[in-house]
Image (cartoon, rainbow, N blue to C red):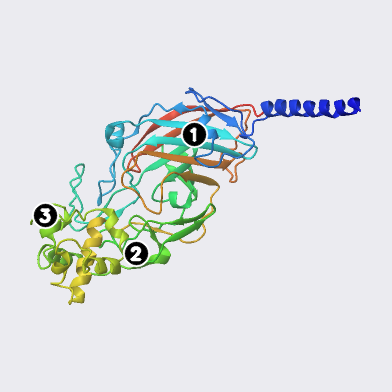
Amino acid sequence: MAKQMYIPAFLFLLLIFQGCEEEKIIPKKGYIPNSPKETTTLNAGYFWIAQNEINSPYWKEADYVKVNLTNQSTGKLYKEGYLNMTGTFNGKMDFNNGKNDSLIIKAGYDDENIYILVEWNDESTNASFMTWLWNGPADPLKPDSNEGWTAQKNSDKLFIGFQLPNDKKDIWKWDLAATAPFSAAENMTMKNDGSFITDRISPIIPNNDGSLNNGPLYEWNGERQEITSQTGTTLLDPAHYLLDLNKTPFIGDVEVGESIFNGKADCRFCHGLNGNGIPDGYTEGGKLQKASVNRYSRTGLKNYISSSRHEGSGSQYFGKIKNNPTEVENLISFLRCISGLPGTILNSENYITDITAKSNTTIGRIDEENKRYQVLFIRKLKASYEGDITFDTNNAYTISIGCSDNDDINYIGDNNITLTFNSSKL
């Protein structure tokens, strides 16, 4: 009887021992645990459970390259009419106001995809390419007049380039104004001289533009803005994005609205000349020259201004014109345009790309204050389009990386990062 009990007990202990050994060999994380260290070569680690989110555990343990950022393109200005849209004009001296431009890059792969995570410091969030402003700020770099309508403010951008034959590069470009709402990157090909020759997969973004002198054609209609892409549904901040389904014709005479604001309605008593936040009176009503004002619909602005929530005696000032609908519309138009109407319109159709690019930016409500961007690129190892790079995990590749701060023609970066793939064997 004792012998019969001994054999099952032995087998039970043997199974426990084997289970412990197996757990030592194959970790549950889905990748080989690692203590992160700075390296000179970008080493892509292998994982057998997809690490496809910025907060996936692999990215906390992955080795990283701290990029030696240098000036790549500087001193370029936009054509006439585009003001204050070169935030990286002087390169590192301007980028992030010249401070803490640290950028690190990490990589990984599985049996199907390559993953590249980029993190960099930028304390201001710029999300509106070609924002329309009425009498916007003067440009210290250009003699162009800032009176009337101007296209100002750019967006923050990042690109990764892979060297191709014939002096070309396969470019993955993430743009906070154009591609971030789709959790995607543009797929482009660039010559060695920096000119783009292909733009195969780009979101359709028509300008919110009649002509440069006439200003915007459309404004937000006040309805909830959502856009659907291959990664899901995204809420859009109306202060920075205008969806084609939610656009309505821009109305009102802004110039007349300006005179009402500073004159008849005397809004400047609390809000300052043209809403600059420096009051003429004793009540500090706050600055109105900020994008967040456009989170109100036109109707919402009217309702707020005329309500008791309008601090001080603001509703009484509005009472001077509230019975004149034309004057009200003109005033609201002025308020919308000193805060900046979006200069582009996003297309509501499903957007499909072969490059996913997830970011840590909340597109539904863009915070003007920022600390650090994170963007995770995901693409098939095998190219989907002829001419794009296909990755052989037995080979090494040369990577370029660049980023712009409120710019699209000046950038800082590095053109000589080596990408290798670590063995997939345990």
Q: Which residue is mark 2?
A: 220
Q: Quadrant of residue 221?
A: bottom left
Q: Which mark is residue 167?
A: 1
Kindly tell me whether residue 1 is visible in this rendering.
yes
Pointers 3 and 1 in contact (C-beta within 8 Å): no
Q: Foreground: 60 or 191?
A: 60
Could you tell me the amino acid type at mark 3? Answer: Pro
Question: Residue, x 12% and y 52% (percent of image)?
Answer: 278
Q: For the N terminus, which image quadrant?
A: top right
Disc 3 to disc 1, how far (Cα)?
58 Å
Whole-percent x, y for residue 239 in the image: 33, 56
Q: Amino acid at mark 2?
A: Trp
Give the residue number, with chain letter if any, for mark 3: 279
The answer to which of marks 3 and 2 sits earlier in the sequence is 2
Q: Point out residue 168 in the picture as x, y percentages from the top left corner.
A: 49, 37
Mark 1–mark 2 CB contact (< 8 Å): no
| Label 3 residue SS | loop
Report the front residue among 9 and 106.
9
Q: Nearer the viewer, mark 3 or mark 2?
A: 3
- Mark 3 vs 1, N-terminal side: 1
Residue 202 seen in this snapshot: no
Q: Residue at x 63, y 38 (%)?
A: 49
| Percent of width and height locating residue 401 | 44, 34
Q: Spatial distance from mark 3 to mark 2, Cα to Cα?
A: 29 Å
Q: Residue at x 14, y 62 (%)?
A: 267
Mark 1, secondary structure of its residue: loop
Q: Quadrant of residue 57?
A: top right
Above/below status of 4 relative to 173: above
Residue that extends furthest to the front in the rendered view of this protein: 1
Locate residue 91 relative to residue 146 in the image: left or right: right
Using residue 198 as the reference point, say whether residue 17 is left or right of it: right
Q: Nearer the viewer, mark 1 or mark 2?
A: 2
